Image: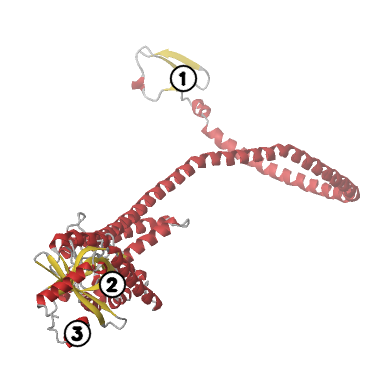
Amino acid sequence: MAMGDQGLFGMAPAAMTLTQFTMAIGDAVRRNPLLQRAWVVAELSDVRVSGGHCYMELVEKNQSGQTVAKMRATIWQSTFSMIRQKFYAATGRDIMTGLKVMLNGSANHHAVYGLSFSVNDIDPNYTLGDMERLRREILDRLNREGVLGQNKMRRMPEAPQRIAVISAAGAAGYGDFMNHLVANLEGFVFYPVLFPAVMQGDRTSLSVREALYKVAQNLDKWDCVAILRGGGATTDLNGFDDYELARAVATFPIPVVVGIGHERDRTVLDEIAHTRQKTPTAVAAFFVDSVRASYERALSLVDFVSRYTTDRLSGEMRRLTNCEALIPALVDVRLSSARSLLEREISRIPVLVSSRISQAGAKLDMTGRLLSALASRGSQRASERLDELTGRLITAADTAMKRNVARLDSLAGMIGALSPDNTLKRGYSITRVNGKAVTDASSLKKGERITTRLYHGEVESEVV
Amino acid sequence: MNDQLSYGNAIAELENIVAKMQRDDCDIDNLAGYTSRALELLKYCKEKLFTTDQEVKKCLEALSSKPE
């Protein structure tokens, strides 16, 4: 204004060279304490590293996403590696496009390149907070839509062996996963198939969702899905904190295992996937462990069956042995009780008998009395009958006697005819040696004494 | 072994056998059957876990080599 006024009064305007002018701006910027070592929050854009320096644009957008402020920024080589490490250690992220950051730095004005922001420090907590807020928003929205816990509810098969792997083909993380899976010590078999996807940057969400879609085409071929980050020391995980991707994973019909996280950081996918592991190697270990646990369970079940069978059989054997031992004793007990019962019965017999006898005697007495009463009534008739019977008996005996005497007489005649006396009477004799009749003269020995029986008397003689 | 059997079914059947054995009315007559079935199931599980299933492998190879 003052210069203009001077001009109006005809004084030559005091013109500056552009250099002088830009230097003046530079001085003004440098001297303004607000613009030096100031904390500024902004979103990173067009981040690129060149010659050890990191160049980027700082932007601020309004609610509708329009850029309302923009400025170039640089992290010089001297501080870049320190800032990068600090940021990664805290957030698990590299300094990348899309991040919201709080930077400490100073405004610089260069005569040729103009105004820029020279970064000398970063506060990772701001970015953490911002990431957390973003994740919270996504999770809240999924929760409202009722799909937040869906994938966690999916049942992981007993032995997950058929694994659809979503990762970047040449990436270290995928290689680690495959090595660990295939080289498991037990020799469990797995069937991993890679569905390649972009695993970092802006295209992550769309690319991973496309891979999930391909997996879903043959859902019955897979036990589960493994989403693995590319690997390497510094990885951009921003792409995973995305609503569309989070929803695709949450609603996926088979379990999703993720290995994309970072020691100190979790993405939205870590919250909603069925199983979360820190690294691709840990995902492989998870599968191997699952199969091992399942196999050991099968072994222990079979072990139970065989142990039970053995125990049960030996138990039954013991039962049998016990029975075997018990039976003789039981038999003894039964026998002796039967014996004592028998003895008791036997001891009762004399009593029973005498009581029976006295009963019978009494009955007999009564019958006797009855009989004698009857006898006295019928004795007359009986004696008449007896006399008659006796008469008939005497006649029969007499007849039989006479017949027998006649028969005896005829027998005696026959016997008399056969008697040796009649033969001896006719002059025959019987010669005996030692009482035995001699029928052969040659049987006699010289000097032997013989006895000869005649009808009257005997003669002793000697053989000469 | 039947076609319906999967690893999960095999383990479930094993558990079922164990459950039956844990009941008081487990019949001695069934022990031999249980034991041989358990061993059969274990053999199946082992095959599933340790032996490459040609059918599955062929299937998955065909899938992954499909042009996109």
Task: Name the residue that disc number 2 marks.
Answer: A241
Task: Name the residue that disc number 3 marks.
Answer: A4
Picture quadrant of residue A90:
bottom left
Q: Secondary structure at mark 1?
A: loop
**Mark 3, other Cα within 10 Å: few <14 / some 14–19 / many ≥20:** few
Give the Cα distance between marks 3 and 2: 56 Å
Q: Nearer the viewer, residue A280 or A118?
A: A118
Whether residue B58 appears in this view of the structure is: no
Q: Secondary structure at mark 2?
A: loop
Residue drawn at x 11%, y 64% as measured from the top left = A52
Q: Residue type at mark 1: give it.
A: Gly
Q: Position of residue A189 (x, y in %)?
A: 20, 62
Quarter of the picture containing the N terminus of chain B is bottom left
Is the residue A58 above or below the residue A1 in the image?
A: above
Callout 3 touching callout 2 (CB < 8 Å): no
Disc number lying in front (1 or 3): 3
Mark 3 or 2, nearer chain start: 3
Mark 1 or 2, nearer chain start: 2
Same chain? Circles 1 and 3: yes
Q: Nearer the viewer, residue A14 or A310?
A: A14
Task: Name the residue that disc number 1 marks.
Answer: A435
